[in-house]
Image (cartoon, grey):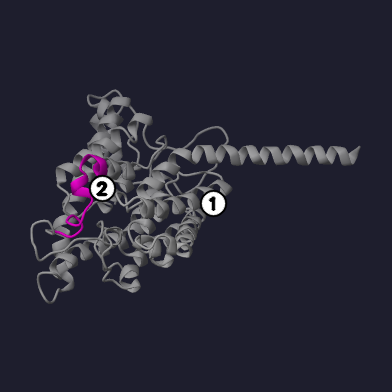
Amino acid sequence: MNWIRQRLDSIKEPFSKGKKYEKFAPAINALDTFLFVPNHTTQKGAHVRDAVDLKRVMITVVMALIPALIFGTWNAGYQYLSQIQETVGFWEAIGEGAIKVVPMIVVSYAVGLGIEFAFAIFRGHEVNEGYLVTGLLIPMVMPVDIPLWMVAISVVFAVLIGKEAFGGTGMNILNPALTARAFAFFAYPTYMSGNAVWVSEAGNLDAVSGETILGKLAAGTEVPYSTMDMFSGLIPGSVAETSTVCILAGALLLILTKVGSWRIIVSGFLGAACMAFIFNMIGGSFPDNDLVNFPWYNHLVIGGLAFGIVFMATDPVSAAQTYKGKWIYGFLIGLFAVMIRIFNPAYPEGIMLAILLMNVFAPTIDHYVIEGNIKKRKNRVKAQVKTAV
């Protein structure tokens, strides 16, 4: 590591203050802080000092995403190969999936970080580590066969409009990864929905079917998967959203490291379960709607609901900040996600719209929670004064 440190110091010399390339210092400093802990500390004033910085938080989230990403890569290859041949080897499926998934990740990071570096140089501030997670999340929530240029344009929209327009990392009101997916969904609907986008080559080969469970239910066709298939992830879907067990493994890491809010995760699943259970109870009133009569527990393990609640809803920037607000915020996300997927066949994947909606209302939820606490304290003081008198 000392050799790397010395090499970086020599490379950084022309970018130091007063030197020829001082303007481009944020770009080279980003590489430094990616490999090493930043060497600047606070010198005066009262500060809370902690070993946990933004880089460590982002790396922890990336580590939590790895199980879902590995499984999603394998599943992308398996879903395609299993329909055109009798046996599929593990590494064969991984290789087939990687051919599709890895280029999406490369494009996402290249375009997104390019824009981040440009804004850092233009504004004269350091490059933040926030895009480490966003750059991985965007391809993970996309269909496997989406053209790479669509991924690139979606990333541009998410970074420019969803993030930099509000001031950059820590200032955005919407989750950037979901902003990219929403843009792609409405700008290129035929590549983001339907029965030919969730399995590779499903639109080109008659032998390959790519319809998701939500698509089958919305169309009123039979679902050929068991609850265990849904929970394990052996179903078509976006790259990394299918395996609930891998997603829960990531959730456990986020909760144990206190990077993700367990209140949002638990309340999100509770909200979805309650809404689905209510619809199950009144299912007789909607005999032709298979989504209404779909078992409530299966609603929790299909689509992107689990992935969205664990990795999107818990975004510390766009989520509610107060403890009570997190319970309300998460519960409403789960409730609205199931409500949208049941009542609007055009948007069977309701978790995206539910999270973006609650991102907008998160500050309002926190406002009323704080106002409620202030009112309680005032009433408590008044009661104490009356008692003293």
Q: Residues within 10 Å of mark 1 (few under 14, many from 20)?
A: many
In the picture as drawn, the residue positioned furthest to the left comes out as 205
Residue at 78% in and 38% down: 381
- The x, y position of residue 356, in whole percent, is 39, 43
Name the N-terminal-most of marks 2 and 1.
2
Using the rendered view, name the quadrant where residue 65 is placed: bottom left
Name the amino acid type tagged 1: Trp
Dot 2 surroundings within 10 Å: few (below 14), some, or many (20 or more)? few
Q: Is residue 317 visible in the rendered structure shown here?
A: no
Residue at 26 percent across and 36 percent down: it is 157
Kind of residue at disc 2: Ile
The boundaries of the magenta stretch are 184-200
Q: Classify 361 as above or below 264.
A: above
Q: Name the front one of labels 2 and 1.
A: 1
72 or 31, nearer to the observer:
72
| Residue positioned 41% across, 55% down in the render | 338
* Placement of 254 over or under 45, stated as above or below: below
Q: Position of residue 351 (x, y in %)?
A: 37, 51
| Spatial CA span between label 2 and label 1 | 46 Å
The picture places residue 93, in percent across and down from the top left corner, at 16, 67
Nearer-the-camera pick, 64 or 24:
64
Q: Which residue is mark 1?
A: 327
The residue depicted at 72 percent of the width and 40 percent of the height is 377
Snapshot quadrant of residue 202 = bottom left
Q: Secondary structure at mark 2?
A: helix
In this view of the protein, which residue sits in the foreground, 252 or 37?
Answer: 252
Which residue in the protein does label 2 denote?
A: 4
Q: Is residue 186 magenta?
A: yes
Foreground of the two, 204 or 102: 204
* Extreme residue in the right direction: 389
Q: Is residue 83 left or right of residue 13?
A: left
- Indicate left or right for 238 with 98 as reference: right
